[in-house]
Image: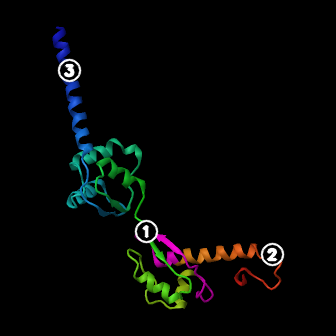
Amino acid sequence: MIKRVIVFLSIPLLLLSAIVGFFYLHLQQTTDADLVFDIPRGENLSSIVQRLQGDRALPVDGAVFKALALLTRDEGPVLAGQYQILEGMTAMDLLALFRSGKVIQYRITFPEGWRLSDWLTAMDDAPYLVRHLKDADKAQVAEQLGLEYDPEGWFFPETYQYVKGDSDVAILRMALGRMEQVLDEEWRRRGMVPHLESPADA
C-alpha cells in the first residue's frame, strides 16, 4: 500500500521535473544574429512570434515563447516600437526588451551657422524620420509650427534624438523650444543691460 502511494505521488513530481527541465533547456538557448525588429502598434503576440521565426530570431519554439509570455504577463505588455535584437539574447531577454520600450534612438546633428534650408535637407536624408516639410518654404514651415514670424534663425544648433515614426516637424519643435529656453536663460542673466527689451535681443 505504501509503495503504491509513493508511486502515485512520484508521478506528478516526475512530470513537474520534466516540465521544469524542458523550460530550463529552452531558456538557455540564444539568438544567433543581430537585427532590427519592428513591432507595429496593435500587433498581437502570435504575429510577433511568426515574424521572429521568419527572421530566424526566435531562440525557442513559438509555443514555448507564448507560454513564457503568458507566465510572465505581470511584468507588463509588449510595447510597439523598433528594437535592436542582439546575438546571444535568450527568450526572456527578448520579452524583457519588448516590454521595456527601449526602442532604437537615432541622432541628427545641426551645426551652428546652418540655414533653415540646410536643416530641411538634413532631415530629408535622416532615416525613419517622417517628412511633412519636404520642399516646404519658410512660410509653410512657419505655418506647420504655428509661428507668426520668419522661422529663419530660430532653431538651436545641436544634436537631437528621435525614434522611428517621429517627424521633421517634431524635430523643429524641439529645436525651437531649445532656442526659446536658451534665450530665456540669457534674458534672466542679462543683469542691468538697458538696451535689451526682450529675450530675442539677448
Spatial CA span between label 1 and label 2: 40 Å
Residue indicated by mark 3: 10
Q: Nearer the viewer, residue 27 or 147?
A: 27
Q: Label 3 is placed on what type of residue?
A: Ser
Instruction: Name the N-terminal-most of marks 1 and 3.
Output: 3
Circle 3 Cα neighbour tier, 10 Å, few/some/many (<14 / 14–19 / ≥20): few
Label 1 element class: loop
Residue indicated by mark 1: 163
Labels 1, 2: front one: 2
Circle 2 Cα neighbour tier, 10 Å, few/some/many (<14 / 14–19 / ≥20): few
Q: Are marks 1 and 2 in contact (CB under 8 Å)?
A: no
Circle 1 Cα neighbour tier, 10 Å, few/some/many (<14 / 14–19 / ≥20): some
Please tell me in which quadrant of the rendered image residue 87 appears. Answer: bottom left
Spatial CA span between label 1 and label 3: 54 Å
Please tell me in which quadrant of the rendered image residue 64 appears. Answer: top left
Q: Residue at x 32, y 44 (%)?
A: 70
Label 3 element class: helix
Label 2 element class: loop
Residue indicated by mark 2: 191
In the picture provided, is 172 more to the left or to the right than 95? right
In the picture provided, is 40 more to the left or to the right than 176? left
In the image, residue 168 lies in the stretch drawn in magenta: yes
Q: Position of residue 111 (x, y in %)?
A: 52, 81
- Part of the protein shown in magenta: 147-171
Please tell me in which quadrant of the rendered image residue 12 appears. Answer: top left
In the image, residue 102 lies in the stretch drawn in magenta: no
Q: Label 1 is placed on what type of residue?
A: Val
Labels 3, 2: front one: 2
Spatial CA span between label 3 and label 2: 83 Å
Q: Label 2 is placed on what type of residue?
A: Gly
For the C terminus, give its image quadrant.
bottom right
